[in-house]
């Protein structure tokens, strides 16, 4: 998985609780991404980062925030989880703005 | 493993035969395309990419063909093996320096031993 780890790998939480997912890379790549994957929708971009403290919204950013204080770490936070945020979340990294993205192993999140 | 999609198009191929997986893309301005493979319970894995100034690119046992006229992309896998069984996605970059990849919903390839 190209030196990318995600934690936790599985999480079950209740509606209304905050949740933070972590992505850690050892490749020193500049760009990092958070996607969610749902049946019938494919992969959809939530947020991305183009450098430390530089982030922007993707296609499905509502209800999510991100932070990147170090090159190697990109955090995704659900401030108040909802059942519609039950999904599999993937982190990805890339060296350049246009080019292959390498994906982590994913986090399965269930919001009850 | 994680479910990557319900009612995905499925392609069943005999081991040793060639596979062709197709993808239609929507944005005529897209200038970069990628194919990914996703096995059950794992993250997508990069297979091969192609830029819009090319029509064909070959890798190890895989070939990607790009037809910009009809906005069509295909992935050919030679001598398909059981380990090729997975869901295959195409993705496009919409150009103009965009960071974003738009992913297709995928095709499930099943290899019959």
Image (spheres, rainbow, N blue to C red):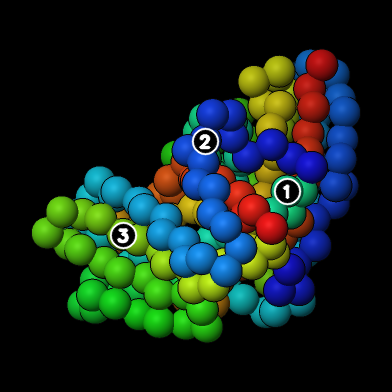
Crowd rating for badge 3 (residues with CA inside 10 Å; few <14, some 14–19, many 20+): many
Q: Residue at 87% of width from left, 28% of height from top?
A: A12
State the SS at label 1: loop
Residue marked by disc 1: B40
The residue identified by callout 2 is B8
x and y percent of residue B7 in the render?
54, 29
Considering only order in the chain, which callout, 1 or 2, is on the residue closer to the N terminus? 2
Q: Which quadrant holds residue B100?
A: bottom left
Can see residue B35? no
Residue A104 sits in which quadrant?
Answer: bottom right
User: Where is the N terminus of chain A found, in terms of image quarters?
Assistant: bottom right
Q: Secondary structure at mark 2?
A: loop
Q: Are marks 2 and 3 in contact (CB under 8 Å)?
A: no
Residue assigned mark 3: B73
Which element carries disc 3, helix, strand or loop?
Answer: strand
Of A77 and B40, the residue lying toward us: B40
In the depicted structure, whether residue A2 falls above or below residue A87:
below
- Chain label for disc 1: B
């Amino acid at each position: 998985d190209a030196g990318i780890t995600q934690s936790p790998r599985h999480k079950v939480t209740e509606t209304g609780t905050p949740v933070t997912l972590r992505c850690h890379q050892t490749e020193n790549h500049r760009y990092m991404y958070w996607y969610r994957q749902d049946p019938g929708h494919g992969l959809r971009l939530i947020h991305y980062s183009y450098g430390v403290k530089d982030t922007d919204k993707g296609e499905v950013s509502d209800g999510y925030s991100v932070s990147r204080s170090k090159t190697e770490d990109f955090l995704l936070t659900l401030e108040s989880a909802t059942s519609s945020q039950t999904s599999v979340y993937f982190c990805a990294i890339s060296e350049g703005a246009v080019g292959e993205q390498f994906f982590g192993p994913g986090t399965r999140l269930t919001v009850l | 493993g994680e479910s990557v999609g319900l009612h995905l198009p499925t392609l069943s191929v005999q081991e040793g035969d060639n596979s062709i997986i197709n993808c239609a893309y929507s944005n005529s301005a897209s200038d970069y395309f990628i194919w990914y493979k996703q096995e059950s319970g794992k993250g997508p894995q990069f297979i091969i990419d192609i830029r819009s100034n090319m029509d064909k690119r070959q890798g190890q046992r895989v070939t990607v063909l790009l037809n910009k006229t009809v906005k069509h992309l295909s992935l050919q896998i030679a001598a398909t093996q059981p380990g090729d069984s997975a869901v295959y996605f195409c993705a496009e970059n919409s150009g103009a320096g965009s960071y974003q990849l738009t992913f297709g919903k995928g095709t499930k390839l099943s290899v019959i031993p």
